[in-house]
Image (spheres, rainbow, N blue to C red):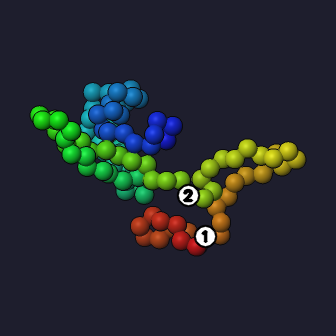
Amino acid sequence: MRHKGGSITPRDLTRGPRRFRENPDLAEAELQRLVTAGQGHWVNQLAGNEGDRPTKLFCLNPARPGDETYVNPEGNADSVAVASKSDGANGEGEWVG
C-alpha cells in the first residue's frame, strides 16, 4: 500500500487481493485492524461533486526510524537497520524511548 501513495479506501481494497473481493465489510474491518494497531488512521473526505458520497480513506502512518531497509554499504553486508533505544510501546501502540 505504501508504494501506491499510502492511502486506500475500503472499496479500493475490494479490487485488490482476492479475499477482499465482493466483501467490503471484510476490507473495512482489515483496515480498521491496522488503525487499531497504530499503523494508520482514517480521513473522512467530503463529497467532491453533487450527488457523490463522502469517502472514508485509510492512510498509513509515516514510517518510524528503523522501519526502513537501507542498502548496505560495501563491507557491511550483514548489518540490519534498527530503531534507536526504546523501552517499547505505550498503551496506545506508540513507541517510547
Q: Position of residue 54 (x, y in %)?
A: 19, 43
Decide if residue 47 is in sight here.
Answer: yes
Q: Position of residue 76 (x, y in %)?
A: 83, 49
User: Quick one: 71 or 26, which is closer to the camera?
Assistant: 71
Q: Residue at x 31, y 44 (%)?
A: 57
Decide if residue 26 is in sight here.
Answer: no
Distance, label 2 to label 1, CA atoms, is 12 Å
Sequence-first tag of 2 and 1: 2
Above-or-below relation of 65 to 14: below
Q: Secondary structure at mark 2?
A: loop
Q: Amino acid at mark 1?
A: Ser
Residue behind mark 2 = 64
Specify whether 3 is left or right of 17: right
Q: Residue at x 85, y 45 (%)?
A: 74
| Mark 2 or 1: the one toward you | 2
Residue behind mark 1 = 86
Q: Position of residue 24 (x, y in %)?
A: 26, 35
Q: Position of residue 83 (x, y in %)?
A: 64, 61
Residue placed furthest toward the right = 75
